Image (tube, grey):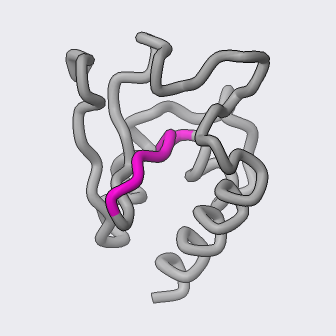
Amino acid sequence: MAEQQRILAALEEYNKRWPRNDYPGAGTSWLNNERYSVALVHEGKLYPPKYIWAMVIGVATPDFNTAEATNGLEDAGFQIITKPGATRR
């Protein structure tokens, strides 16, 4: 349960930092980047799972892989999907 609360807090923080869901900024969105093949779904909104997981565990994204992030999020009860238009690796 504590893990779920940390994830929810990370989602809230993400929404404050990236209200237009345009992480990592610079005029482009992770949603339009083919390097991102999966998405975390929460309350009908898509989130970059690896970035959210990095916020939860306090580790930089290069220090773990996407599978670790998606597994951790799914284990906590969150839904991971193949991003629309992407092929899951």
Q: Position of residue 86 (x, y in %)?
A: 26, 17
Any magenta on residue 17?
Answer: no
Query: In the current view of this chain or complex, which residue is farthest to the front?
Result: 20
Relative vertical location of residue 54 with respect to residue 22 in this rendering, above or below: below
The residue shown at (63%, 32%) is 22
The residue shown at (27%, 57%) is 79
Relative vertical location of residue 64 with respect to residue 78 in this rendering, above or below: above
Q: Position of residue 51 (x, y in %)?
A: 61, 42
| Nearest to the observer: residue 22 or residue 71 | 22
Q: Quadrant of residue 62?
A: top right
Q: Quadrant of residue 23?
A: top right
Relative vertical location of residue 27 with respect to residue 21 in this rendering, above or below: above
Relative vertical location of residue 74 with respect to residue 12 in this rendering, above or below: above
**In the visual, does 55 lie left or right of 66?**
right
Query: In the current view of this chain or complex, which residue is farthest to the bottom?
Result: 1
Q: Position of residue 43 (x, y in %)?
A: 36, 67
Looking at the figure, which quarter contains the C terminus? Answer: top left
**In the visual, does 26 lie left or right of 63?**
right
Looking at the figure, which quarter contains the N terminus? Answer: bottom left
Q: Position of residue 65 (x, y in %)?
A: 50, 31
**In the visual, does 25 lie left or right of 89?**
right
Count of picture labels? 0
**In the visual, does 25 lie left or right of 78?**
right
The residue shown at (32%, 64%) is 78
Q: Please provide the residue range marked out in magenta.
A: 44-50
